[in-house]
Image (cartoon, coloured by chain):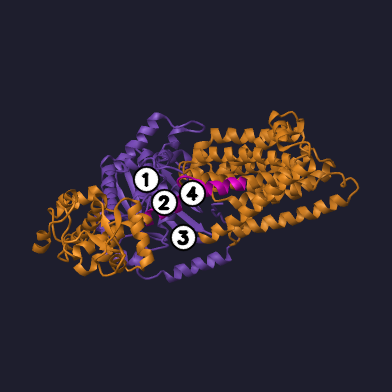
Chain colours: A orange, B purple
Amino acid sequence: MNGKFFQFSRLLYILLFFFLTCNLRAEQVSENTTIFLKTVRFLSLTDYSVQIVLLGVIFMGFGCGLMGGFVVTRKLSLFGDTLSHAVLPGVAVGFLWSQSKNSISILVGAMIAGFLGVFLISLIKKTTKVRLDSALGLVLSGFYAIGICLLTRIQKMEFGNQSGIDRYLFGQITGLSSSDVWGMGISCLLIVLITILLYKEMLLTGFDPGFARSVGLPVDLLQYLLWMLLAFSVITSLQVVGVILVSALLIIPAATASIITQKMKGLLLWSATLGVSAGIVGTYLSFLGNQLPTGPLIVLTSTLFFILILLFHTENGILFKWLHSRGREQKISVENTLKAVYQELEKNSFSDDTITISDLAKRRRINMPEANKEAKNLVRKQFAFLLKKENIALPNEDTLSLTPDGWGEACRIVRNHRLWELYLTNEVQYAPDHVHEDAEKIEHILGDVTVRKIERILSNPRMDPHGKLIPSQQDIEKGYIDKKLVRVL
Amino acid sequence: MNSSPLPLEIHDLTVSYHRRPVLYGVDLEIEEGSLVGIIGPNGAGKSTLIKTIMGIVPSRGGWVKIFGQKGKKSYTRVGYVPQRESVDWDFPVSVLDVVLMGRFAHVGWFKRVSKKDRSIASECLEKVNMLAFADRQIGKLSGGQQQRVFLARALAQESDLYLMDEPFAGVDAVTEDAIIELLRELKNRGKTLIVVHHDLSNAKDYFDQLILLNMRLIAHGEVEKTFTKDLLQKTYGGRLTVFTEIADQVANTQTSDQVTHNHL
């Protein structure tokens, strides 16, 4: 957990650095255009390029987000990555075929290469003992290497110079044409359509392919359909974010969504929404800072969303969990101190209603500063008040006295502890010297209902296995324990 | 042959995994309304038999008839309970979602589950005493509860033949009692049940018939006739050394044309 957290905080620093530099640049480059004016320009959608790009990233974010939901829940995250690398040789060959960058042949080439990659993976799985992750890595790096070789050759050719073919490697959104956006739109529409129509079939084949086969579903066919859609969304997104970052569009929104919800429908919706939001925010940020590329900024925004939700989600967030456990620890500490005060009072047969801080320190086995802190905690919670007394051994030492609330809480904890000990010895047949440690933990979590139940089972006992008095409800309400009673027991 | 077809008829069924034969020439005829246990040592091919009947694992020879029919059409009449470990319990689905999956074969392609399907699923959850957990994510259940969810899903299939793969594995005593009670109730309603079982100590009490399996069919029949020292020894004792050796040889020499199964 700690190691993970360290990585995230480092990521956060890097992100912060980027956003700062991005803002600085915006101010340096154009002194008369403030961020505000740029924001207005962005939001009013007056620039045609902004319109095109925004439409593109919305389609891309939605489609990839949905696909990511399916891919991540099937534990095939690496599969999207492999597919995105595998299409690269196809892009290059398609480009060579038509010698232009906006053409259907690139799409076709990418599809063919993608399916070749998928086919090779299944072939390796079927015929060899190589495991799936190794097969994925093999195909990923092999195809990528071929792609890089071809692309380098193309760039050295005469028509290659102006081709902008390297945008497939790193992504470049400025050259986005309306036909590219059409492609994204169609792929997004297909994904939405299939998700709606085949939701339950996809759910079943994803969760339990064996059972799906047993009810006659064509599991392999559905899987190929999923891969085809995955290939569509990967190929259409390539020019925005590039080969390497495409898988981030698939994985990050879905991973974020899986922190938020544990239902498939919710996960798909959240994933798509997060994908779209990251697309819009990333585009806006790159619009503010002229020098920064859109694709990586979209991925960074997506990562930022992930970190924010990981930290601040109200149920599964790290911060919430930390606060929760800290609150519990504090409660336990306060309860232990109250118990110690009670035991000190009991030691004097309740003849005195105050104890000294040094007694408390001794009883709780902590040092004086810690004991003072604990005492102040009780005072802050209005469980006790501090007062100075003159005629005790240590001059000017504060003494502690419980308020009615504090007395009630102290009695409750001691009662829980002793009742549980008695329950363990009488009903569960524990030896009396084995029960204390267990009771130390259970005393903090016993609820009123359970306490009543135990009292009924043990018929309202007054004495614990060690011969000590169990404070009763009346003792709590009365506010003190009769000295005579203590002596009798 | 009877006028009405048998729930399950298997002839000369042979199956292999990665070229290695795991089941040889199995012949079986199961009559309607029987509660049958499949027992045998680890690696005897018990789960494989079930999976082959359900078409999850392809066979290399022989045939399976379910209510007189071969192939996919017959699957709607079979309820299937896979092994609990076969799925990812972190998958984002609720208990009710999983039970509804049992209705999918009845719902048909592209359509959504109806209110009627939902009420059937709820009834099935009620039967296994899990209705209170309907909305819970399946990972947040104990092993016994997860098994009951699978059982409820099979009930929701409203089938006539049930195939269950180790439904008693890793469940608490209460769940075990609940399951066996449910199996008997189904049997009394004329359903046919075939259950892979690993615990010899109670196999005799749980089932009416036993199938003794160890790569081939050792015996099939009423418990009194099959739960005998001789037959059990034949099933469990004495490793079939020559048999396994040959199987290994086959695995090493045979070329291509094998059909393997992958989960990619």
Q: How many marks?
A: 4
The numbered dot on residue B149 is 1
The three-letter code of the residue at mark 2 reads His
Residue A110 to residue A420: above or below: above
The one of A100 and B50 positioned closer to us in this rendering: A100
Whether the magenta-drawn stretch holds residue A313 is answered as: yes
Of discs 4 and 1, which sits in the foreground?
4
As helix, strand or loop, the secondary structure at mark 1 comes to helix
Residue A87 to residue A366: above or below: above
Distance of label 4 from label 1 (alpha carbons)? 29 Å
Indicate the position of residue A30 as horizontal and vertical percent values: 79, 40
Q: Name the residue: 66% across, 59% down.
A: A138
Residue ID for mark 4: A317
Stretch of the chain drawn in magenta: A302-329
Distance of label 1 from label 2 (alpha carbons)? 32 Å
Q: Are marks 1 and 2 in contact (CB under 8 Å)?
A: no
Q: Residue furthest front?
A: A390
Of discs 1 and 2, which sits in the foreground?
2
Q: Are marks 3 and 4 in contact (CB under 8 Å)?
A: no
The numbered dot on residue A324 is 2
The crowding category of the residue bearing disc 1, from other C-alpha atoms within 10 Å (few below 14, some 14 to 19, many at least 20), is many
Of discs 3 and 4, which sits in the foreground?
4
Q: Are marks 2 and 4 in contact (CB under 8 Å)?
A: no
